[in-house]
Image: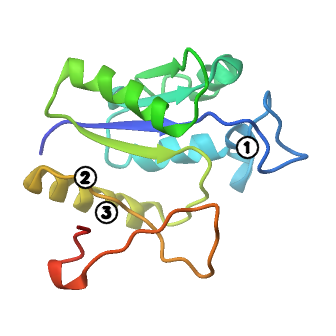
Amino acid sequence: MQLIQAIILAGGKGERLWPLSRAKKPKQLLPFTDGKSLLAQTIARLSLLIEPESISIITNQEQYEQTVAAAGNLVGQVCAEPVARNTAPAIALMVLKAMQKNPDTILVFVPADHLIDQNERYAAALEKACAYAAEKKCITLLGVKPRTPATGYGYIEYDRSTDGVAR
């Protein structure tokens, strides 16, 4: 399979888990299950499929030092956005960096602040999605089926007759 590069999105303003999280103490760096941070759990989950040197983290300037300390030598690089501008510009920056190195790389973007307790199942789904993306040369999305409507999230509509491929 082609080279897979995972980029962990680890920025944010520290507002979603207030009062525990703050800009200088973001949710992804707080201890959760077994005392491990969500960032540490994300790195461990990705490491089931991807080599550490192919895992990167993008964060903001304010959280950069803490993120570097938390990641240690478990990732290839930690980058800080020059200016925090939300998710799309962070992804664009990392795409440009990755494409300069290898334009055929499969890029995997994952948030640092999700709690996922089925790591092997997640890794299997990610491996399948990467293989599909490589074969079809397309964008592949993983998501969860929503239990209730929520305006804070987007929804993906797909046509089941096309093997689950969104059009």
Residue 100 occupies which quadrant of the picture? top left
Between 139 and 32, the one lying in front of the other is: 139
Which residue appears farthest toward the left when viewing the image? Answer: 135
Badge 2 vs badge 3, beta-carbon distance below 8 Å: no
Between 47 and 100, the one lying in front of the other is: 100
The residue wearing badge 2 is 139
Badge 1 vs badge 3, beta-carbon distance below 8 Å: no
Tag nearer the camera, 1 or 3: 1
Which residue appears farthest toward the bottom when viewing the image? Answer: 161
Q: How crowded is mark 1: few (under 14 residues within 10 Å), some or many (20 or more)?
A: many
On-image quarter of the C terminus: bottom left
Tally the marks: 3
Between 68 and 86, the one lying in front of the other is: 86
Residue 129 at what x, y percent from top left? 25, 59
Q: Is residue 160 above or below residue 117?
A: below
In the rendered structure, the answer to whether residue 89 lies left or right of residue 25 reads: left
CA–CA distance in space, label 2 to label 3: 17 Å
On-image quarter of the N terminus: top left
Q: What residue type is labelled 3?
A: Ala
Q: Which of marks 1 and 3 is nearer the N terminus?
A: 1
Q: What residue type is labelled 1?
A: Lys
Between 101 and 49, the one lying in front of the other is: 101
Q: Which residue is drawn at 63% across and 28% down?
A: 70
The residue wearing badge 3 is 124
Q: Earlier in the sequence, mark 2 or mark 3?
A: 3
Tag nearer the camera, 2 or 3: 2
